[in-house]
Image (cartoon, rainbow, N blue to C red):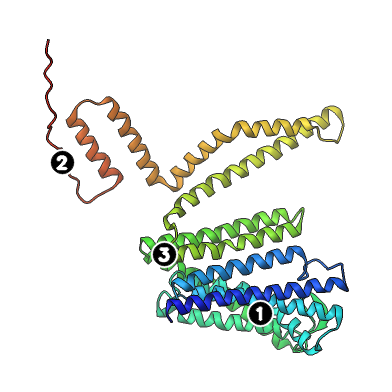
């Protein structure tokens, strides 16, 4: 396939995905004429619309960009397919909700649409966590030895989808509709459990394949793997934060976690098209610094407010928190921001970027000596030592241009 044909096909899939999504949202909004109060999580709900649109556009656009530039890379077409399935899922669910509210249209079509929507989310979750790790970054397996892992992933995903598609009982979030293709048999439970175990094993093996690929990779491919690892680490950290947020609001927690998941296709697209590839070291450094800084300042703030409130309660016996505690905690954070940031930056540079930290210290020391030293021979030896220590070349040579400056005679 030529790049022009691949670009046309990829962006056509994006347009088709968006059309499916818009059609599903339009059907869900049409339900408002008969059921103005839509339940949370329905297709016409504002939160669901925003999240579905973000997921679809992110995967589809990134997949189209990758497929247009690298038609043979499987990851681009996989992302385009994920966007297409997300759009089709929204359309089928919207039609099922519209049929339940109005009764318009064939019942068999509505039931089938609800059935498809009940299990369409499974490949969206399972496929990226297996084949993305196995095929990244060039869209091919690390070696033919990993083909059994790929086949196990295919079998596991097929069994997992089959277990949900043939599960007897109500269809997901639409309990009014019973699965017309359901099989009430213990065999389906065994198939689902076995498929889940196979998928878990495939995920572990896929992660190991990425580690093996990183150990054999060159400099460029290692930077690409850093981008994917950064996106995955961001998702894991956000899931932890979302678990804390869930104490106050489950909806906000789900939204934050879903948005963080979009970091995986974005980082994957940046890595594959090699856009600003070597900025990842700077991004990781700043994420570590400001992530640790935010956690410490939040701890200081809430700790200061809690301690001040406890002292105020013990002295006055009142339960109401004084505004003075918030003001004092805010002033303490403002005073600690820059000193704490510098200390965290220095610690992270020493711990995770030791080589660059040593290079910077060496250059700072040489700059200071350059201002004070007047002996040219000493400076020559010092310069050679600095170059050898910072750049670590195979050979070092120093050439000085002969002095051709004009001599100026001073006349009395």
- Determine whether label 3 and label 2 are within 8 Å by CB: no
Please determine whether, in this image, residue 171 is positioned above or below residue 407.
below
- Give the left or right position of residue 265, taking residue 35 as reference: left
Q: Residues within 10 Å of mark 2 (few under 14, many from 20)?
A: few
- Give the left or right position of residue 262, taking residue 96 as reference: left
Q: Position of residue 162 (x, y in %)?
A: 66, 85
* Residue drawn at x 55%, y 79% as measured from the top left: 153
Q: Residues within 10 Å of mark 3 (few under 14, many from 20)?
A: some
Looking at the image, is mark 1 or mark 2 nearer the viewer?
2
Give the spatial CA distance, label 3 vs label 2. 40 Å
* Residue drawn at x 54%, y 60% as measured from the top left: 231
Q: 6 or 148, which is in the foreground?
A: 6
Residue that label 2 marks: 399
Please determine whether, in this image, residue 304 is positioned above or below residue 105.
above
Give the spatial CA distance, label 3 vs label 1. 32 Å
Please determine whether, in this image, residue 374 is positioned above or below residue 294.
above
* Residue drawn at x 78%, y 32% as measured from the top left: 323
Element type at mark 3: helix
Q: Quadrant of residue 83?
A: bottom right
Q: Quadrant of residue 299?
A: top right
Q: Position of residue 353 (x, y in %)?
A: 42, 47
**Mark 3 / mark 1, whichever is N-terminal:** 1
Which of the image's four quarters has the C terminus? top left
Which of the numbered marks, if any, corresponds to residue 214? 3
């Amino acid at each position: 396939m030529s790049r022009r044909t691949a670009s046309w096909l990829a962006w056509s899939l994006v347009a088709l995905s968006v059309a499916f999504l818009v059609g599903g949202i339009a059907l869900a909004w049409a339900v408002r004429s008969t059921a103005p109060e839509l339940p949370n999580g329905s297709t016409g709900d504002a939160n669901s619309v925003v999240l579905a649109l973000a997921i679809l556009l992110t995967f589809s656009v990134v997949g189209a960009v990758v497929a247009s530039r690298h038609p043979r890379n499987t990851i681009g077409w996989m992302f385009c397919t994920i966007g297409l399935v997300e759009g089709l899922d929204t359309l089928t669910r919207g039609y099922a909700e519209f049929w339940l509210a109005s009764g318009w249209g064939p019942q068999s079509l509505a039931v089938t649409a609800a059935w498809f929507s009940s299990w369409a989310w499974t490949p969206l979750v399972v496929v990226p966590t297996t084949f993305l790790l196995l095929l990244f970054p060039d869209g091919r397996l690390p070696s033919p030895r990993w083909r059994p892992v790929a086949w196990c992933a295919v079998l596991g995903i097929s069994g997992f989808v089959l277990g949900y598609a043939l599960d007897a009982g109500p269809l997901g979030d639409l309990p009014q509709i019973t699965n017309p293709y359901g099989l009430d048999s213990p065999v389906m439970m065994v198939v689902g459990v076995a498929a889940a175990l196979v998928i878990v094993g495939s995920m572990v093996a896929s992660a190991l394949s990425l580690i093996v690929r990183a150990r054999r990779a060159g400099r460029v491919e290692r930077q690409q793997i850093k981008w994917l690892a950064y996106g995955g680490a961001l998702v894991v950290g956000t899931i932890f934060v979302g678990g804390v947020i869930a104490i106050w609001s489950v909806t906000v927690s789900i939204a934050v976690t879903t948005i963080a998941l979009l970091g995986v296709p974005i980082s994957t697209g940046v890595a594959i098209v090699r856009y600003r590839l070597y900025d990842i070291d700077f991004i990781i450094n700043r994420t570590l610094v400001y992530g640790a800084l935010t956690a410490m300042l939040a701890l200081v703030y809430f700790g200061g407010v809690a301690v001040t409130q406890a002292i105020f309660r013990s002295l006055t016996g009142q339960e109401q928190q004084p505004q003075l505690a918030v003001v004092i905690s805010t002033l303490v954070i403002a005073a600690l921001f820059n000193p704490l940031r510098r200390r965290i930056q220095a610690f992270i540079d020493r711990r995770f970027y030791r080589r660059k930290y040593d290079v910077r210290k060496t250059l700072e020391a040489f700059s200071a000596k350059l201002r004070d030293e007047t002996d040219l021979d000493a400076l020559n030896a010092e310069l050679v030592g600095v170059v050898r220590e910072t750049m670590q070349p195979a050979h070092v040579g120093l050439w000085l241009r002969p002095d051709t400056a004009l001599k100026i005679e001073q006349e009395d």
